[in-house]
Image: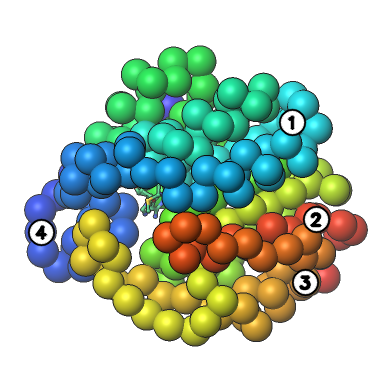
Amino acid sequence: MSETVKPQTNAEDVNTDSALAYENHAREFLRTRDGSVAGVDIIKRWARSLDPKTDVLEIACGAGMPVTRILTEAGLNIWAIDSSPTLVAEFRSRFPGVPVQCERAQESNYFDRKFGAVVSIGLLFLLDEDEQLALIRRVADMLVPGGRFLFTAPLEVCAWADLTTGYECRSLGQEIYERALRESAFRLVGHYEDEGNSNYYDAERQGEPIR
Ligand SMILES: C[S@@+](CC[C@H](N)C(=O)[O-])C[C@H]1O[C@@H](n2cnc3c(N)ncnc32)[C@H](O)[C@@H]1O
């Protein structure tokens, strides 16, 4: 397993790299996220809509609470990646049977395999615009036809400071996300909003991407 991200405290890097920003605030993040129930009902419903035993990739798993816990309890087979060494170490102690790589989403080889579903909660808007669009294309390539992709990002075009890290987040907005999904041969299944007002895009991969 590769461990590509080294924790740093250099202020400039922390402002330009979400991976370093999260590693530097990992304990603080755990304190708030571990007790959070935001999105639990949506994730449970999504997990139930998948075939039992579906191979699911979780991108930016954090320490796995509550999302990974729900997915494993639903009987799905999980693979996961996250860039924070601290959060990945915590994840490994909580889910010793789940393969997890400590890597940036932009650089991961994603276990060099295909999946029946991909979930990414709280990541896309931490990336640059090009990286966000590249990740949507990459997910399409990793999914089998009929595979599902659930991710969070606002419907609006907006920017804001991440609550835990202060990192600047960027939403490309519904029009651009949905166009990117269509261009990667996804059909939008639905949008959902959770208790914390986060928006979820639920999409299904159909034929081959138009590229
Ligand atoms: C808002 S948290 C969400 C974590 C988890 N999905 C959850 O729902 O609790 C964002 C996560 O993205 C990870 N992250 C930040 N930048 C990343 C990157 N470039 N590649 C992979 N993971 C990243 C952080 O370490 C953190 O675990």
**Mark nearer the N terminus (4 vs 2):** 4
Q: Is residue 57 left or right of residue 49?
A: left
Mark earlier in primary sequence (3, 1): 1
| Point 52% across, 82% down: residue | 156
Of callouts 2 and 1, the N-terminal one: 1
Spatial CA span between label 3 and label 1 = 23 Å
Query: Label 2 vs label 3: CA separation?
Result: 9 Å
- Residue at mark 3: 182
| Kind of residue at badge 2 | Arg
Q: Position of residue 113 (x, y in %)?
A: 68, 35
Question: What amino acid is labelled 3 in the image?
Answer: Arg
| Residue where numbered disc 4 is placed | 10
Q: Secondary structure at mark 3?
A: helix
Q: In the image, which disc is placed on residue 54?
A: 1
Crowd rating for badge 2 (residues with CA inside 10 Å; few <14, some 14–19, many 20+): many
Label 2 and label 1: CA atoms lie apart by 15 Å
Q: Are the two marked residues, 4 and 2, in contact with CB atoms closer than 8 angstroms?
A: no
Between the C-alphas of marks 3 and 4, the distance is 39 Å
Between marks 1 and 4 in the image, the one whose residue lies nearer the viewer: 1
Q: Which residue is mark 2?
A: 205
Residue beneath the point at 85% across and 48% down: 146
